[in-house]
Image (tube, rainbow, N blue to C red):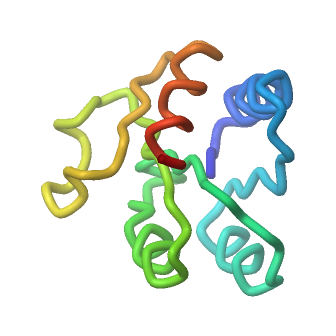
């Protein structure tokens, strides 16, 4: 999930370079809900914490319930994430392909 078009495209490119299959992006909470409802296979998700002024925690809750690991991406670092989610890997913006690769390794381990 990413609401900034340029960041979403860059993230998609980085994930493809890392050998991932990309099933998004979802740029709004509703789009993310629809994606989850579509029963598409998701191994891991990258969630911007604040999407169009809405916190993504309802999507994080849903992913947790589905057993799908995820990474939070935020320019605010760990301080920008609700304390409930301290165990989730944080991808600090701006990030590199290497940062994403490391976060994915944590997410999928």
Question: What residue do we see at 83% from left, 56% from top?
Answer: 23
Indicate the quadrant where residue 75 lies. Answer: top left
Indicate the quadrant where residue 42 lies. Answer: bottom right
Q: Nearer the viewer, residue 17 or 29?
A: 17
Question: What residue do we see at 79% from left, 34% from top?
Answer: 12
Where residue 64 appears, as percent x and y from the top left, is 43, 74
Above or below, 21 against 103 in this view is: below
Report the label total.
Answer: 0
Where residue 6 appears, as percent x and y from the top left, is 74, 26
Where residue 96 appears, as percent x and y from the top left, is 58, 13
Above or below, 41 against 2 in this view is: below
Q: Is residue 8 left or right of residue 61?
A: right
Q: Is residue 40 left or right of residue 92?
A: right
Indicate the quadrant where residue 16 lies. Answer: top right
Q: Nearer the viewer, residue 94 or 99?
A: 99
Q: Is residue 38 left or right of residue 101?
A: right
Question: What residue do we see at 79% from left, 70% from top?
Answer: 41
Where residue 39 appears, as percent x and y from the top left, is 80, 83
Above or below, 19 against 46 in this view is: above
Question: What residue do we see at 24% from left, 41% from top?
Answer: 80
């Amino acid at each position: 999930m990413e609401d900034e078009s340029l960041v979403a495209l860059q993230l998609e490119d980085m994930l493809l370079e890392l050998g991932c299959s990309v099933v998004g992006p979802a740029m709004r909470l509703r789009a993310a809900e629809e994606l989850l409802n579509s029963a598409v296979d998701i191994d891991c998700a990258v969630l911007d914490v604040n999407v169009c002024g809405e916190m993504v925690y309802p999507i994080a809750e849903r992913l947790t319930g589905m057993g799908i690991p995820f990474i939070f991406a935020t320019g605010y670092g760990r301080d920008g994430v609700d304390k409930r989610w301290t165990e989730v890997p944080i991808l600090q913006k701006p990030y590199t392909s290497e940062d994403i690769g490391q976060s994915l390794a944590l997410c999928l381990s």
